[in-house]
Image (cartoon, rainbow, N blue to C red):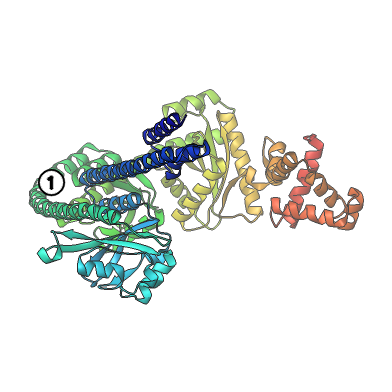
């Protein structure tokens, strides 16, 4: 029995070693079981001796495993550092690996600032204090200063009470804000040691927020990592220096090549721009040619700053900024910078009249040869724009006669109108928007000219008709008539210098439908003037119930949805009846007392519902104008039986 007990205990100890048991308490259990089973003292002594030997083996194995993990981590670190070329990435990898290897709360690296004469926090990992992360340390101060001076590692289980270090208010405040207690620091050395000519290029730290004694093995491990780090930092610096030298050589070579290229470019530019003038090229051709010659994106803008053509990746510019820069170019009689981004503007002129501008992008170092080429392109562009404007005016005059006949006699010969339109490049059977513009304070002729300029490069027809300017604009899918009217009003106002009101209708297709849309736009224009909306753009849908009355479709459902839609959606979603409350409130003459009697609820409940209505519809829901629209929408909603 006793021999079997000893054998069983030995087997269990071997099993624990084979399974890699984590805790030492597991090794004491076989002896405890033997003692409980009544084993004799000799057997117990043998089991306890075996237990002691098993614990020694267990500790040895654990040390070997830990060392194996550390060596593996160091090899991984060396591989990571060897693969990195960017210094910031190198430093971040060092600090993160230090924290993982030692299992500390945080790790960080300080480096000397030779110009400022102190050291600064270059990289941190696990830090939560902005004060600590921005800490700068005087040379010789704190634990890190002692490590840098002596080129030896130092560790403290509690930094705040350790008198070996030169404590300063700034350092102690940062350490306290981060909550650090135990700190280990090792130097990053280039060379064997300071006495042998080594140079300290930084200090690598690992720190905990609780007291901790760092073992010699941990100090050695962090020192090994610091040695890798020092070499990696030095390599990264050397690589950066080599790259800088190569960049300087490349720059010198580029200057020589640029000088030779400028001579060749001048010859090519002269030939290509001359061919453009002789062959009557389009504006886009000029932009593409200049962009190719200068190697930068080029955009052509009209006199209002809106784009006509572009070549290359051209960023969007505010029209007002382009117009202002073109005015400066016109006054200076040369190309001028546009903003701080290295952009340039050259005014495109026909005598004193501005036709537009050329914009050169991303060329901060515009030299004299390129500037002369850019300005020459402006002259060529002026000739082409002037020619296109003359042709467009002639074509629009013929098309304007077609549009005038369509508006005055759409039923006389619809097929003939459509056929004439096709010969002139306008498909009247396709969907179009009708825009009617008027400027009471301006000249109708000037407004018509501005309308033609607005259509320049966009297609469409513009003509004077009955004291207004009528624009027939091809409808693009997704185009909102109201948005088209607002954009047109804004641009015509800028072109004429006087407020221009624009009303839109459509889309419509066919002579009869287009004439009907024109009549609706004309009524909308008169209504906008009557409502004090001079200088704005819009359509019947923007005029509320007035638009319902003016529109040929009488879109009652759209009007109700536009006015009561938010309330109807809220009631449907919440199961409430705010629409009914609002109807009763208006029916009772906006009297809370009468409304609460009609609804059979407390007056405070009525007030709360009205507050909710205000939150949904806006603060002006009870104004005279909004109130009128709401009451009309409530009546129409009731009559149409939508609910």
Indicate whether 557 appears above or below 4. below
Q: Disc 1 designates what residue? A: 265
Indicate whether 417 appears above or below 496. above
Indicate whether 502 appears above or below 340. above
Q: Is residue 36 left or right of residue 376?
A: right
**In the foreground, 429 or 360:** 360
Residue at (40% x, 35% y) in the render: 13
Q: Position of residue 403 (x, y in %)?
A: 50, 36
Q: Position of residue 145 (x, y in %)?
A: 26, 70
Instruction: Name the image quarter holding residue 452.
Output: top left
Residue 363 is at least partly visible in this image: no
- Indicate the secondary structure of the residue bearing disc 1: helix
Residue at (13% x, 59% y) in the render: 192
Q: Is residue 186 left or right of residue 255?
A: right
- Dot 1, how many residues are within 10 Å of its Cα: few (below 14), some (14-19), or many (20+)? some
Residue at (42% x, 44% y) in the render: 24
Q: Position of residue 205 (x, y in %)?
A: 31, 60
**In the foreground, 326 or 136:** 136
**In the foreground, 276 or 371:** 371
Instruction: Name the image quarter holding residue 48.
Output: top left
């Amino acid at each position: 029995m006793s021999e079997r007990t000893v054998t069983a205990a030995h087997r269990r100890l071997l099993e624990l070693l084979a399974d890699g048991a984590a805790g030492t308490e597991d090794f004491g259990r076989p002896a405890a079981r033997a003692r409980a089973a009544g084993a004799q003292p000799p057997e117990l002594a043998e089991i306890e001796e075996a237990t002691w030997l098993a614990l020694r083996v267990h500790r040895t194995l654990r040390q070997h495993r830990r060392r194996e993990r550390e060596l593996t981590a160091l090899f991984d670190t060396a591989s990571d550092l060897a693969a990195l070329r960017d210094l910031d990435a190198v430093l971040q990898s060092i600090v993160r690996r230090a924290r993982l290897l030692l299992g500390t709360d945080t790790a960080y690296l300080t480096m000397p600032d030779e110009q400022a004469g102190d050291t600064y926090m270059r990289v941190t990992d696990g830090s939560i204090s902005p004060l600590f992360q921005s800490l700068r340390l005087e040379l010789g101060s704190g634990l890190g200063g002692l490590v840098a001076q002596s080129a030896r590692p130092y560790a403290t289980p509690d930094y705040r009470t350790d008198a070996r270090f030169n404590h300063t208010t700034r350092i102690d405040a940062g350490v306290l804000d981060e909550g650090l207690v135990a700190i280990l620091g090792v130097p990053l050395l280039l060379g064997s040691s300071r006495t042998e000519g080594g140079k300290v290029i930084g200090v690598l730290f690992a720190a905990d927020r609780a007291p901790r004694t760092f073992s010699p093995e941990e100090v050695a491990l962090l020192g090994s990592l610091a040695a890798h780090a020092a070499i990696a930092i030095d390599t990264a610096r050397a690589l950066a220096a080599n790259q800088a030298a190569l960049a300087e050589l490349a720059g010198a070579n580029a200057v020589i090549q640029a000088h030779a290229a400028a001579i060749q470019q001048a010859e090519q530019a002269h030939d290509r721009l001359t061919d453009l003038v002789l062959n009557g090229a389009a504006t886009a051709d000029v932009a593409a040619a200049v962009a190719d010659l200068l190697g930068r994106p080029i955009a052509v803008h009209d006199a209002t700053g809106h784009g006509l053509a572009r070549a290359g990746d051209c960023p969007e510019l505010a029209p007002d900024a382009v117009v202002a820069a073109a005015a400066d170019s016109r006054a200076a009689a040369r190309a001028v910078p546009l903003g701080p981004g290295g952009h340039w503007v050259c005014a495109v002129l026909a005598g004193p009249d501005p036709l537009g501008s050329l914009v050169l992008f991303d060329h901060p170092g515009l030299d004299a040869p390129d500037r002369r080429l850019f300005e020459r392109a402006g002259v060529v562009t002026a000739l082409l724009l002037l020619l296109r404007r003359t042709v467009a005016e002639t074509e629009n005059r013929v098309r304007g006669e077609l549009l005038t006949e369509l508006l005055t006699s759409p039923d006389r010969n619809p097929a003939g109108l459509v056929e004439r339109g096709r010969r002139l490049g306008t498909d009247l059977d396709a969907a179009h928007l009708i825009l009617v513009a008027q400027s009471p304070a301006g000249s109708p002729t000037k407004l018509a000219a501005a309308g033609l300029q607005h259509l320049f490069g966009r297609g469409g027809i513009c003509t004077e008709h009955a004291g207004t300017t009528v624009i027939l604009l091809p409808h693009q899918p997704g185009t909102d008539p109201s948005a088209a009217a607002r954009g047109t009003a804004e641009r015509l106002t800028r072109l004429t210098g006087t407020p221009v009101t624009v009303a839109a209708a459509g889309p419509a297709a066919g002579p009869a439908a287009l004439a009907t849309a024109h009549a609706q736009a004309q009524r909308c224009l008169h209504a906008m003037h009557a409502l004090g909306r001079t200088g704005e753009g819009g359509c019947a849908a923007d005029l509320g119930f007035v638009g319902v009355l003016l529109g040929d479709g009488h879109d009652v459902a759209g009007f109700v949805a536009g006015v009561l839609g938010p309330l109807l959606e809220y009631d449907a979603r919440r199961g409430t009846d705010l629409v009914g409350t609002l109807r009763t409130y208006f029916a009772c003459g906006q009297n809370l007392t009468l409304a609460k009697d009609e609804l059979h609820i407390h007056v405070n409940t009525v007030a709360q519902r009205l507050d909710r209505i205000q939150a949904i519809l806006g603060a002006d829901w009870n104004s005279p104008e909004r109130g009128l629209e709401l009451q009309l929408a409530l009546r129409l909603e009731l009559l149409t039986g939508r609910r």
